[in-house]
Image: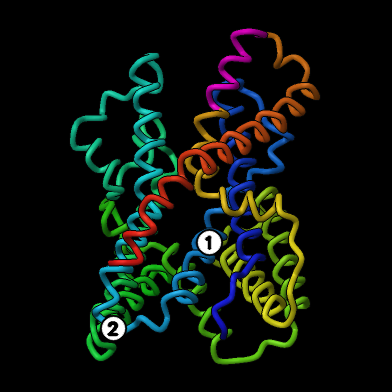
Amino acid sequence: MSRKKLNLIQVLRGLAAVLVVLAHTDLIFNQNLNQNFFYKVFTFGGSGVDFFFVLSGFIMFYIHQHDIGHSNKVGTFFFKRFTRIYPIYWVILTSKISASLIFGYDTDSQSNIGEYIKAFLLLPQDRNILSTIFLGVSWTLSFEIFFYLLFGLLIWLKPKFSFPIIAAWLTGVLLNFFGIFQLTQNNLWMQMIFADYNLEFIFGCLAAYILTKYQIKYGMPIICIGTFLYTLSAINYYYSIITISSVITFGIPSTLIVLGCVALEQKKNINVPNLLLYIGNASYSIYLAHGFFINNITKIILKLKPNITDNLLALNLLGIIIGIIAIFCGCLIYTYIEKPLFLMFKPKVATT
């Protein structure tokens, strides 16, 4: 598989971010306005997290598969991952904390110095604490960091040492997933290490491996099947017909969509609108910052117009506008903060 820029993967990253924005618009509407957003149709948007995990696994294997077993590459790998995750995260987290302290809202008595350290290092944390003074979405970044550490292990050690370690870990994840052993009770570290979500990173890696070894001829049909299954899962989520892990309901369809999109783009160049590429490029900033903007805009509107909740149509249209504003603000953060930070570190990456 040739290492070419995959524009459709960027589009999928943007789509995953937008799904999360829609889900959090409903969540924040419930918290701040005591109203649903579009009758809770978009609550399945939390599945954007499942999509992100699959995409992350795919991208890691796609980019670094040839680094596995080459310990001289591990320093560059971790430096790239560090500069990709932490700098803009620290900027947004610090801004959120500062705003909370200055204006005296979204504070939590449980937020001691230890919790601040955990938040800045992206160590496992109680999600209720994260949702107050810190960034609610950062729990997913803890999974990302853990996955990077595992992949770094594959790069650092020879396969005869790293593969048994990964196999043992994956066995634990599967045992926990199937309920044979409960390895995640009452321990945040164990909940992260053996969580179902880890399987979605594996799905992404598996998709990249398949595309490395085989020529996939039917990209579009695979995309259609994945989209159909994803839609069924969204309907099932809304009506709560069957309770199944999101790893199955959204992780597998996400994997099929990724597999089909890359197979399609390997065969021919796909013309993707620049706007969709831009949103994909800005997806991380959108993901980190959108909750802050949605939360504060709704609070401001409620103060200015307390009776806004009386008109449900106007309220739903307002929700769409607020979501668009949050995405736009995330794009501004990408352009004027995240991208310059990345470019600042890029020359150092090249010489590491």
Find residue 211 and report its image quarter: bottom right
| Quarter the N terminus occupies | bottom right
Front one among 330 and 159: 330
Residue farthest right in this picture: 313
The image position of residue 266, as x and y in percent, is: 67, 80
Sooner in the amino-acid sequence: mark 2 or mark 1: 2
State yes or no: residue 91 in magenta: no
Query: What residue lies at 29% left-to-right and 41% top-to-bottom?
Result: 119
Look at discs 2 and 1 and give the one toward the viewer: 2
Q: Quadrant of residue 158?
A: bottom left
> Which residue is located at x 66 percent, y 55 percent?
277
Circle 1 — which element? loop
Magenta residues, as a range?
295-306
Q: Where is residue 34 drawn, in percent x and y?
A: 61, 22
Would residue 49 be found to the left or right of residue 147 on screen?
Answer: right
- Which amino acid, by three-letter code, is at mark 2? His
Q: Quadrant of residue 286?
A: top right
- Kindly identify the amino acid type of the residue bearing the numbered disc 1: Ser
Check the image and report above or below for 165 versus 30.
Answer: below
The residue to which callout 1 is attached is: 245
Q: Nearer the viewer, residue 10 or 239?
A: 10
Give how far across and how far down residue 192 sits, in percent.
33, 58
- Tell me the crowding category of disc 1: few under 14, some 14 to 19, or many 20 or more residues within 10 angstroms, Cα based: few
Majority secondary structure of the magenta segment? helix
State the separation of the CA atoms marked 2 and 1.
36 Å
41 vs 237: above or below: above
**Mark 2, secondary structure of its residue:** loop
Q: In percent of the image, x 67 and y 87: which residue is there?
A: 216
User: Residue, x 53% and y 65% (percent of image)?
Assistant: 55
> Which disc is residue 139 wearing?
none
Name the mark on residue 70.
2
* Percent x, y of residue 193: 31, 63
